[in-house]
Image: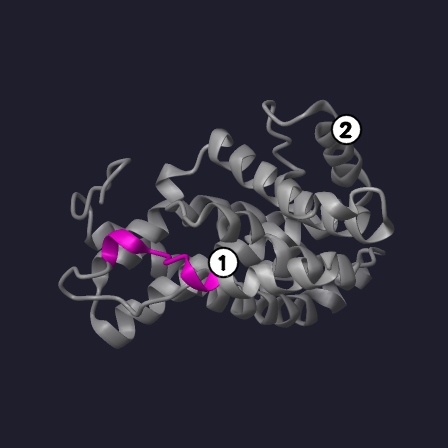
Amino acid sequence: MPILDVWKAPQIGLRRVVRWKKYIGAEPDVRLQNALQHSHAITILGAMVATEIQPYVKRKGMELDRGLLMTALAVHDLGEGETGKDTLYIDKSIEGDLEEYQAFLRRYKLSKKGPMFNYLHRAFLLQFALANPQNFPLSARALMSGIAITNRLEAMVFDVVERWDYVLYAVEQYYERGNEKILVQTLRHQIPHLNRLSNELPGFGEKIWTKEISIWATELLKDCDGKYEEQKGEI
């Protein structure tokens, strides 16, 4: 029964995928988080962010498709549930993105000709639409090109929520477990993007990634200059 298969698969697969793996067992340790927990939490976070920025978006004459955004956040890691692995931010690549996309297609291939697949397919590709990786199939690239035009706002909000989620997890480990390393390494990756997005996405800089938070994060990195240098492929 196809619907039973696609309904059950993420419940089982995502639960087995451990995130932030290289920090587990380190001193100080981090809270164990799997991809199922992450997918649930980031969807809630997306609803919170969307609510905060909505008045600013409306003032610009834009309309946010919350349904598409929420679906995209809920399904964005389905490929990880199929491959059984999470990729740390520093190790992400277009090859890995393609692998996850292909895994998503394999799971949902039974419904490829129906409206359910079309909607979930579009939602899954939202995360890649602004980058439009060159190694993706031409049909997917064409769809992402369209998404980048018609749903650019939703793609930007997705980007914001994903990056904000990274930071929040690292902040939790810093404040609750004293893990400075994970926060410093995460901020090094995310500050430039969050600063840029605070200028591009209405409301984000005013309500979430405020100047005060950006200054605090930047000062923390200055205090830790030369510490916790990160390399690709660390275990």
| Mark found first going from the N terminus, 1 or 2 | 1
Q: Is label 1 or label 2 in front?
A: 1
Q: Which colour scheme is used?
A: one colour
Seen as rendered, the residue at the extreme front is 1
User: What mark, if any, has residue 142 been given in the picture?
Assistant: 2
Whether 28 is drawn above or below 195: the answer is: below
Q: Where is residue 34 in the image (x, y as percent from the top left)?
A: 41, 63
SS label for mark 1:
helix
Could you tell me if residue 51 is visible in this image? yes
Q: Residue at point 58% right, 50% down?
A: 159
**Magenta segment, which residues?**
13-23
Three-letter residue code for mark 1 = Gly
User: What mark, if any, has residue 13 been given in the picture?
Assistant: 1
Q: Position of residue 188 (x, y in %)?
A: 34, 46
Mark 2 crowdedness (10 Å alpha carbons): few <14, some 14-19, many ≥20: some
Secondary structure of the magenta portion, mostly? helix
Three-letter residue code for mark 2 = Ala
